[in-house]
Image (tube, rainbow, N blue to C red):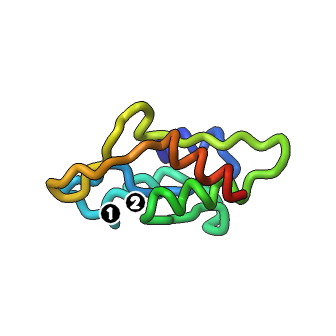
Amino acid sequence: MGEIARRLADVAIVTAEDPRTESLDDIYNQIISNIQYPISNIYREDDRQKAINLAIGMAKPGDIVVVTGKGHEKSMCFGKIEYPWSDREAIVMAIDKS
C-alpha cells in the first residue's frame, strides 16, 4: 500500500485495518517505509473513523479520496475480537460532518 500511495497520492493517511495481534507501530512503519513524501504529507491516525474524517475534511473540490483495506467487510479485528465496522457507513458519516 505504501508503494501505491507513493506513486499515486499527494497525501497518505495510514490507519488501522484488521491489525489482529500485530503491533500497529510495526504495521505503520512497514507501510511508511515505502513512502518517500515529505513527512508533512503523511498522517497516522490509529482510529479508522477519525482517519476517514480527516481525509474527507482535507479534500478540496477536484480531489479524489480513496479508502482502502476494508471494502465490503463488515467487521474489524483487534486482538482476537471482531468489532462491527463498515467503511461505507464511516465515509457517509464523515461526509455528513463536513
Residue 7 location (% of width, % of height): 62, 40
Helix, strand or loop status at disc 2 = helix
Residue 86 location (% of width, % of height): 43, 43
Q: Seen from this angle, which residue lies furthest top?
A: 72
User: Given contact means CB atoms under 8 Å apart, are the residues at marks 1 and 2 in contact?
Assistant: yes
Residue 2 location (% of width, % of height): 49, 47
Counting labels gives 2
Q: Is residue 8 left or right of residue 29?
A: right
Q: Amino acid at mark 1?
A: Leu
The residue pinned by badge 1 equals: 24
Numbered mark located on residue 28 in the image: 2
Helix, strand or loop status at disc 1 = helix
Residue shown at the point (85%, 45%) measured from the top left: 61
Q: Please say if 62 is above or below 42.
A: above
Rounded to the nearest whole Å, what is the CA distance between mark 1 and mark 2?
Answer: 6 Å
Q: Is residue 95 left or right of residue 70?
A: right
Q: Is residue 72 left or right of residue 42?
A: left
Quarter of the rendering occupied by the C terminus:
bottom right
Q: Amino acid at mark 2?
A: Tyr
Q: Place residue 9 in its image quadrant.
A: top right
